[in-house]
Image: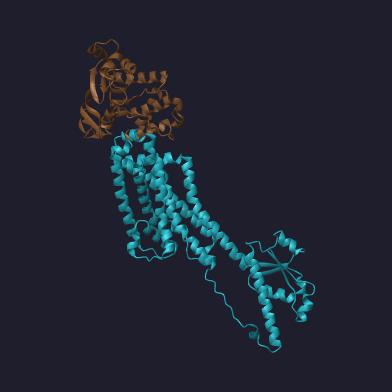
Chain colours: A cyan, B brown
Amino acid sequence: MSTLRQALVVCRKELKDSLRDRRALWSIIFSVVIGPVLIGFMMNRLADRQREAESVQIPIVGMHRAPALVDWLNQQSGVRVVEGPDDAERAVREQREAVVVVVPDDFAERFRASRPAPLQVVADSSRNDVRPSVQRVQLLLQQYSAEIGSLRLIMRGVSPAAMRPLAIEQIEVSTAQQRAAQILTFIPMFIMVAGFVGGMQIATDSTAGERERGSLEPLLVNPAPRVAFVAGKWMAATLAALVSVCMTTLLCAQLTRLLRLEEMDIRLQIGPEHVGPILLAVGPLCLLTAALQAAVATLARSFKEAQTYMGVLILAPMLPGVMSSLYPMGNALWMYALPMLGPYMLLTDILGGRPADPGAFLASAATCLFATVVLIRITTGLFRSEQIIFGR
Amino acid sequence: MIRITDVRKRFGKLTAVDGVSFVAQDGAITGLLGPNGAGKTTTLRVLYAVMKPDSGQVHVDDVDAVAAPQRAQSRLGVLPDGFGLYPRLTAREHLDYFGTLQGVDAKRLAMRTEELIDLLDMRAIADRRTGGFSHGERTKVALARALVHDPQNILLDEPTNGLDVMSTRAVRSIVRRLRDQGRCVLFSSHVMQEVSALCDSIVVIASGRVVAQGSPGELRRQTGLDSLEDAFVALAGLDRGDHEEAR
């Protein structure tokens, strides 16, 4: 029987064994799902607020007393005027309406007489969620008031400019799109972490766990070279990591489609057609992380110790994401050859819709493969050591 | 047949095995008898090639186990100290895993698995996960797993340790059956009665050295003592009170 076939036998057994480990399985699913769900939640809130503020429905009590105002409001984009509820204050207090405008009886009379005509904006300032809508309504009314004021001044032969000693212009730099794009920069990080977490359980359980259960010694009595055992365990961990990556990617794709990002004019896109390139970018990294996990777990004195090390190692795939949000980074070819940074940069390229350079893919994959081979050789060496096999 | 010649193994300053030599013949049950820490497990580990001796030779059916460990291993069925089962796999899956790794082809493996399930009376537990198994049930699985590739030489490291009477009897009857099939069975134990009831040949080991070997009768004659237990105590030097605790 060839070494490869023996490795495949080991791989199959490790996969079967770990699939039956319910608790580990759930922890993987949880960690794979939590990222996309978190992003989805944040994006959804952002988009909702945006939409709410832009298109606002204004219930007005006593519409017939101010037909000109109603007409003007209806002409504004995203505004729809409806008949207000009988008891405006109660409707707002009970949160049936975000905001209600009340036109009092003497409005028309005072308006005609060019005296300040009363208007009531009923709102609950303790509610954060409707604040954009309330602000929008207030702004609209102020605009209307200013326009009427200007017309009156012109009729009296006074320039409206006299009423505006200051021309204040507010420039908002943080648009909703920018905030959304910021949230989406986490996607590459979540994909990389999914690859790490996916293989972690098998990599530790089949090495440190196997030794702790005492099943490593009987396993090694089988006539196979040590590299067959190491390779089999590594393959199983890699496969699990790749499955996690696929799951997270598809989830993110589904999510961004549901959120209709193109409406918000966001370039970061992820669809089913991106799954291939993403796997190409992260696949070699999965080989590397699985090999790294197996090496570290084999070196650990116990299963617990191995898990502790994994908790530290998980920072590695998170590092490029954190770094790039702190320091702007270029994209020189040599940077793609760095173990964790390369796949991260490829992911941001793919998701940002930039054409992916084959050279960058190659540089990233070559480093990962080289490191993987080195790590597997190290682990095989450890599997030959009596101190490691029988514990220290 | 197993032949060990002048095997030595040290762990740091501790000499666990200090020049052990013996032969275990085909068609015979050889008992490796010694107190805890005498070097039995280390000797067996060197024998089934998961440890390399510092010096000395190990031959399994004329295969050099030090130079060609994998060839030797395919001729060995091993029940190691502590069974090391996978709690999430069934008994049958254990046989399947090890049988495939030993290179037994699928058809032969299926047949062999059924044979062993009957032989060890495991029908009721064959498709249950081993996680909740009793000690006796775990022994059966580990034993079946050791025999799945039909090896000529069988090494059992304290197989009856902690077993109840019925399970012990079952193990003994299987060991005898293997002997009657002409196989070489090497059996380690620290229990006198066990060895005297079962073995054709006994190797007494103490502090990493072979202190006596021969049939139960020969050992009694050698020491001039009637009871094998007294003989064991005398041979192992346990009566002198200077017995060193060794690995």
x%, y% of residue B111?
Answer: 37, 28
Q: Is residue A153 above or below residue B92?
A: below
Give the quarter of the figure containing the N terminus of chain A: top left
> On the image, which quarter does residue B76 sit in?
top left
Residue at 64% in and 86% down? A162
Quick one: A236 or B132, which is closer to the camera?
B132
x%, y% of residue B94?
Answer: 39, 32
Quick one: B233 or B151, which is closer to the camera?
B233
> On the image, which quarter does residue A216 sit in?
top left
Q: Is residue A267 visible?
A: yes
x%, y% of residue B174?
Answer: 35, 20
Quick one: B246 or A64, which is closer to the camera?
B246
Quick one: A382 or A64, which is closer to the camera?
A382
| Residue at the front extreme of this rendering | B241
Direction from residue A390 to residue A63 in the image, left or right: right
x%, y% of residue A183?
Answer: 50, 61
Q: Is residue B29 above or below residue A43?
A: above
Q: Is residue A240 visible?
A: no
